[in-house]
Image (cartoon, rainbow, N blue to C red):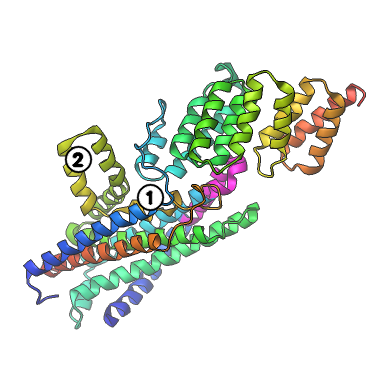
Amino acid sequence: MERLPLSRLLLIIALLLLVAAALAGIARQSRRDQAELPLAFLTPAPPKLSAFGFTGALAGMRRVAADWAYIEMLQYYGTGRNRLDCGFQGVIPFAEEIFWLDPHFRFGILYTAAILGFNEGHLPEAISLLQRAARTDPGYPRYRLYLAGLTYRKAHDNPRALQILELMVQEPDRPEILVRTLGNLYIKNKDWPKVRAYWRRVVMTDKDPRTLWEARLALAQAAQHGY
Amino acid sequence: MRQSWVIGINIFRQLLRNRILTVLAIFALAMGGLSVFLGELGQESEARLGRDFGLLGVEWIGYITVLLCHVVLLFEETELKTITMLLVKPVARWQYLLGKLVGSSLLAALNVAGLVLVLLLVGWARGYSLASLPFFLAAFFLLWQSVVMSAVVLLFSVLASTVPACVVYSTFTFFLGHFTGNLVEWMAKLNEGAALVLVRVLYYLLPNLAIFNLSDSLPLGGENIKTGIALSAASFLWPLAYGAIYALAVLLLAAWQYQRKEI
C-alpha cells in the first residue's frame, strides 16, 4: 500500500467504483425483472400525497410509507366527527396514497375499499380502486369477489350483494369491518332470525373486541324483537 | 490480514468497554417498542406493520452503530492521542483502518442480531411470527448495508478530523444513498439535462443503499407477492458483490488519505 504509486492507486479505485456501478445496475435490473415495487415516479403520483409518503417513496421505503398512510387512514376513520366530512370522504385520498405507494398491500386496499363501498357509500371510488388493484395483482382472486359485491350494491341488487358479502366474510383473513357490515345489514333489513343466528355465530368464533361488543348489542336488539 | 483481525477484535472489545452497547441497546429497545406501538395502531395488519417498522429499526440501528463506533474512535484518536501507541508498533495504517472496519462491523452485527431477536420475541408475545427466510434475509442485507456505511463513515472520519463534520457528512451520504435511484428517474422525467448529469454522477459515486432494501422487493410473509414469482439466487448475490467492491474502493481511498495524514 505504501509503495503503490498514487496514479495506480487512483486508477484501481476508479476501476473498483466502475465495477461497483455496473454491479449495482445488474442487481437492480435482476430484481426489477422479477418482483419489486415500481420506482417512485414510474406511475403518476396521486393528487394528495403526504410529506411522509413523498419522502418514503423517494427514499425507497414505499412499504413503510404505505403502512404509515394506512395508520393515518385508520386514525381518520376512527374519529367520529370526520363523518361530517361528506361521510368520511377523506378516506379516498388515503386509499389513493396507499395504492400508489404499495400496490401489493392487499389487506390495506381491501380494507379501504370495504370502508368506502360498503360502509360509506362511495361506490365509484371503491370500484375504481379495486379494478386498478385487480389489474396490478391479477393473481389475487379476492379483489374480484369484492368487486362483484360492490357492483351488485351499486346496481341496488341487495340480495346478491348480501350473498357475495356472506362469501367474503367466510375468508379467513378478511377485514374485520366486513363482519360488522354484514351483521348490520341484517339488522337494517330487520331479518331478526338471521340477525340472531349470525351474531351468535360471531360471538362463538370471533375474537375482535369491537366486533364482540357490537354482537352483544345486536343480540340484545334481536331479543327485544322476540328472537 | 491477521493483524487487522486482531486490531478489529480489540476495537470491538474497546467499544464494548466504552458502554456504547448500553446506549445502543436502549435505542434498540425503543425501536422495538415503537414497532409494537405502530403495529398496534395498524390493528389487523399488526404483523405487517411490526415487520416493516422493525426492519426500518434494524437499518437505523445498523447505521447509528457504525457511526457511533467511528465517532468515538475518532474522538479518542484526536483528543486522547491513543493512536500513537498503536502506530509505533509494526502495524501499517491501512491495517489499522481495516481493523476499525472489522470492529465496527462486529458491533453492528451484534446489535442487529439483538434487535432481530427483540422483534421475534415481540411477535411471539403478540401472537404473530416473523421467523421466515425473507425476514432474516432482509435483516442480513441491512447489516451488509451497515458494513458498506462503516467504510463510508471511516473515510469521512479520516477526511473530516472533527466529530461533528464526520457525523454531518456521513448522515448526509446515508440519506442521499437512499434517494439517488429515484432522483435519477425523476430528473430524467423532468428532462433536466444539467441536473440529470449531476444526479447521475452522484448516483455512481455515492453508495446505492436502495439495493440493500429487500423489504420493498421480497414477498415478506405472503402479503406483497407480485404474481408469485420467486427471486433467483443471483438477485441476492449481486447486491452483496456490489457492497463488497464499493466498500473496498472506499477503504482504499480512506487508506490513501490516512497515509498522507499527519498524526
Which three-letter amino acid code belongs to the residue tagged 2? Answer: Leu
Rate crowding at label 2 as few (under 14), some (14 to 19) or many (20 or more) other CA atoms within 10 Å: some
The image quarter containing residue B6 is bottom left
Q: In the image, A43: left or right of A150? A: left
Q: In the image, B109: left or right of A127? A: left
In percent of width and height, residue B220 lies at: 52, 53
Residue under label 1: A32
Task: Output the chain of dot 2.
Answer: B
Residue under label 2: B196
User: Residue at 89% across / 22% down in the picture?
Assistant: A224
Q: Which mark is residue B68?
A: none
Q: Check the picture and name the quadrant holding the N terminus of chain A.
A: bottom left
| Magenta stretch contains residue A143 | no
Which three-letter amino acid code belongs to the residue tagged 1? Answer: Arg
In percent of width and height, residue B42 lies at: 57, 40
In the structure shown, which secondary structural element does the residue marked by tag 2 occupy?
helix
Q: Is residue A190 above or below residue B155?
A: above
In percent of width and height, residue A207 lies at: 74, 43
Res. B62 in view? yes
Tally the marks: 2
The image quarter containing residue B43 is top right
Q: CA distance from mark 2 to mark 1?
A: 22 Å
Q: Is residue A168 above or below residue B102?
A: above
User: Residue at 60% across / 35% down in the picture?
Assistant: A144
Tags 2 and 1 both on a single chain: no
Write the start and end of the magenta stretch as one range. B28-50
Q: In the image, A136: left or right of B75? A: right
